[in-house]
Amino acid sequence: MTAPVPEFPADFLWGVSSSAFQIEGSPTADGRGPSSWDAFTREPGRIKDGSHADVATDHYRRYREDVALMAGLGVGAYRFSVSWSRVLPEGHGRVNRAGLDFYDRLVDELCARGIAPVPTLFHWDTPLALEEEGGWLRRDTAERFAAYASVVADRLADRVPMWITINEPAEVTLLGYGLGEHAPGRQLFFDALPAAHHQLLAHGLGVQALRAAGAREIGIAASHSPVWAASGTEADREAAELYDTLTNRLFADPILTGAYPDEAFASLMPGPVAEDLKTISAPLDWYGVNYYNPMLVGAPQEHTSAATGTAYAGIDIPPGLPFGIGQIEGYERTDFGWPVVPDGLRELLVALEKRYGDRLPPLYITENGCSYGDGPDPATGRIADARRIAYHDGHLRALHRAMGQGVDVRGYFIWSVLDNFEWAEGHRQRFGLVHVDYETLDRTPKDSYAWYRAVIERGR
């Protein structure tokens, strides 16, 4: 029998996470406008199982049931996102009061259950009207984000103890604008860098807007991964360093140090960069880390066959990029194919502490989770997702080790509370502590739900 996870501080915050587009459904209800992801899911071939998120888990109508499930877990906080186009259907200008009322009701329901609401203002779903004008390639999208942040905070700041400006700007930049795998489906490669700068500027302007509206405890949720070179060759080391810069430092450095990691990157950014960096680096109350697995990176010249022009040695080299991603061997994998490397979380957190030192505010793990497709037993209905329990058990132990090495971590949010629409994968991947039957929308807590409840109870 596995020993209980180590003891965490009594005030450690235990939470769960979700995002609006992945669970809410009701894409036109009560005046909501379309988002970039609504349009993306309608393009043939974009979503691997051909599904869309028009219903998702129907959280928009079933939020009370879902909050009751969170209360049953005993979590101290729920990290959700606000749909920008539900509040501002065109992305700016006219406020949709009915859409804002939904989040008002959700926050009240959470508070009534003793759960702290932790809203994320942008979790990838850009209002379609803004996207069609250029989206994050345009500077005024950042300014419109700040105006939107003011609208939400004016309504909710009296009851919300923690705020997140933007979720994973690296993924929006690289997958959405660089490689075209996510909305809006652009393949701009390095010409996508303005999207990075404008999201960072939006974050900084959003912090200003939130503080002006009386919001407190403001942070960002940034994706981070340790980056491992595929070999000891100089070319592979340089490729890994470039990938680390693009996915980790390009976003963290401006926020935490007020500078881009390399002058070459700063020169590629649009606008008055030096002035913008003063806004981007406004002090934060905390910094959120989303961790899933390390990345193995190699250089094209090291891993491409001259005879056939194809990648080998497990490194996939996308056309037009100076690096490729490989499969990390020797570890178990989730159903998504991601390696399960719990100590990668400790490695990452210790590296962040070493790199940023006193500039690093207290940390929260704002996402950590795994996809496993375990379903109900036909006879008993039980969902025995032992692999998910082992995953979170291992990552909590790694997190505890990082804290023992001096890293200041204040909380842990599991991704995700419910099975949901998993972006370009559609409904094929299941991350939830609660199983959702997409035909009936019935919710069934998995064994991992009971396990996490026991962890939280012991922590008290």
Image (cartoon, rainbow, N blue to C red):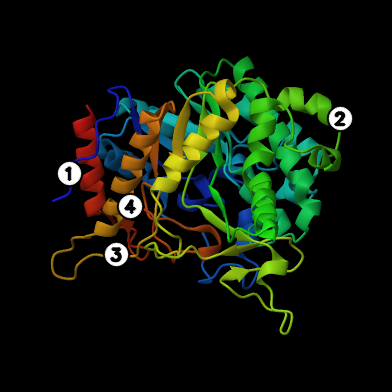
Is 310 or 428 nearer to us in this picture? Answer: 310
Horizontally, residue 278 falls left or right of residue 417, namely right
**Residue occupying image coordinates x 75% and y 39%:** 197
Among numbered discs 2 and 3, the one appearing first in the sequence? 2
**Residue occupying image coordinates x 66% and y 49%:** 241
Asked if labels 3 and 1 touch by Cβ distance under 8 angstroms, the answer is no
Among numbered discs 1 and 3, the one appearing first in the sequence? 1
Residue that numbered label 3 is attached to:
374
**Residue occupying image coordinates x 47% and y 29%:** 363
The amino acid marked with disc number 2 is: Pro
Secondary structure beneath dot 4 equals: helix
The image quadrant where one finds the C terminus is top left
Q: CA distance from mark 3 to mark 4?
A: 14 Å
Asked if labels 2 and 1 touch by Cβ distance under 8 angstroms, the answer is no
- Packing grade of label 1 (10 A; few <14, some 14-19, many >=20) is few
Q: Where is 356 relative to 321, above or below? A: above
The amino acid marked with disc number 1 is: Ala
- Count numbered badges in the picture: 4
Q: CA distance from mark 2 to mark 3?
A: 51 Å
Secondary structure beneath dot 3 equals: loop
- Packing grade of label 2 (10 A; few <14, some 14-19, many >=20) is few
Question: Which disc is residue 391 wearing?
Answer: 4
Front tag of 4 and 2: 4
Is 107 or 142 nearer to us in this picture? Answer: 142
Q: Is residue 125 visible?
A: no
Q: Where is 45 relative to 247, above or below? A: below
Residue that numbered label 1 is attached to:
3
Residue that numbered label 2 is attached to:
272
The amino acid marked with disc number 3 is: Asp
Among numbered discs 1 and 2, the one appearing first in the sequence? 1
Q: CA distance from mark 1 to mark 3?
A: 24 Å
Q: CA distance from mark 4 to mark 1?
A: 14 Å
